[in-house]
Amino acid sequence: MKIGFDAKRLFNNFTGLGNHSRTTVDILTEYYPDNHYLLYTPKIRHNAVTDKYTEHKCCRTILPHGLLRGSAWRTFGLAKAARKDGVDIFHGLSNELPARLDIPSVVTIHDVAFKTFPDMYHAIDRFTYDKKWRHACRIADRIIAISESTKQDIIRFYGVDPARIDVVYQPVNDIYYTADKGICPQSLAQYAANPYMLYVGSINSRKNLLGIVKAIQLLPKEIQIPLIVIGDGREYKQKVLDYITEHKLQDRIIFSPEKVGTEGLRYLYSNARLLVYPSFYEGFGLPVVEALLSKCPVVTSNVSSLPEAAGPDSLLVDPASIEDIAEKLKILLTDDPLRESIIEKGYRYAMDSFSPKVLADRLMEVYSKLA
């Protein structure tokens, strides 16, 4: 089978959507190497991460030829290129499909946060995203939602027949399935040498970092270990920093001065007392799964997709309740037998639910419906 991908994010984005694109191609080439995988991209940012795919024996990278370039080629020229290359199935990995696509197609929808949290997005961005998502949901033969929660959002906002939607969870970087414990980021070594809690993710109002900071204030002083924050933001981050300064919490909330990379994240998860992730909305909640696979217990929200990511044994909270967050943190910081039980059960849940072989098989099941 010849499968084409919109690989712009794979070659040019090194966070969420780019990571998803790469791990998707990784598990397919690992478990289904007899297929041919065509990676369509308007450009390539060459580095050690992306060069792996240009040199992969199962993959062929296709760049624009002719007058159309950049986003114009991706929107209006990609379908013609895929048809010319004899692609059997085209998969839009990041919420979009090209115009005039006339071969069997799949699109992965990650979330509709611009509809559930519209205040976080400029009006023009909301309009653009909505147009792209709507087009993809209309023309795709199959739609992949990365969680049951996202599936319900697609049905709610775009009126899609549920029978057209398949749920396939997001793959995780393969380091999380190995015994590799990662490497401590040098810039955080002095903090990681002692007990700490961990937050991983963008710093915006939806992710609720300020709620975490306020919950830490409610903890008894003797268990107020530092929180290491991995992520960045703008206006909301400044709001959090102002609150920290006002309440003299600088020794309790530690912001990473640099991007720590996959090896650094693996180390921080593996050695943290817990991950705290009380987001108000997530399409999937990748840090939760990464933590569970690293045997790091999780406190996360009881809303959107997060109960799916966390499983039945993690501690769930109402993200709007500072008191609830504080209470669950206190439990994991003081009850060691329960913490150990949660770690083992969470690890087993994550290995069973998010193993790369299981997810690769589910993707191929989706493709087989169109073959």
Image: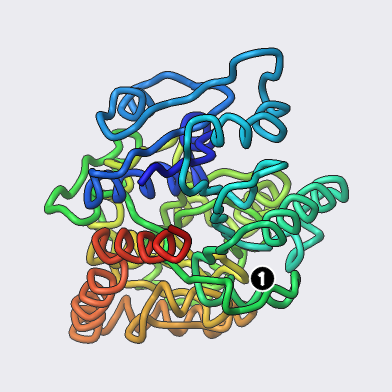
Query: Residue, x 56% and y 76% (percent of image)?
Result: 149
Relative vertical location of residue 52 with respect to residue 308 in this rendering, above or below: above
What element does badge 1 sit on? helix
In this rendering, is residue 331 above or below 168? below
**Amino acid bearing label 1:** Ile
Q: Nearer the viewer, residue 68 or 347?
A: 68
- Residue in view at x 35 percent, y 60 percent: 364
Image coordinates for residue 266, horizontal then vertical, percent: 27, 49
Residue under label 1: 154
Q: Position of residue 240 (x, y in %)?
A: 64, 54
Residue at 61% x, 79% y is 162
Counting every numbered tag in the picture gives 1
Left or right, 188 with respect to 220, comes to left
> Within 10 Å of the Cα at label 1, are there few (<14), some (14-19), or many (20+) other Cα atoms?
many
Residue closest to the far left: 179
Residue 75 visible here: yes
For the question of whether residue 193 can be seen, the reply is no
Judge left or right: residue 104 versus residue 188.
right
Q: Nearer the viewer, residue 125 or 184?
A: 125
Q: Is residue 137 above or below residue 67?
A: below
Describe residue 156's horizontal placement relative to residue 334 as left or right.
Answer: right
Residue 187: quarter of image: top left
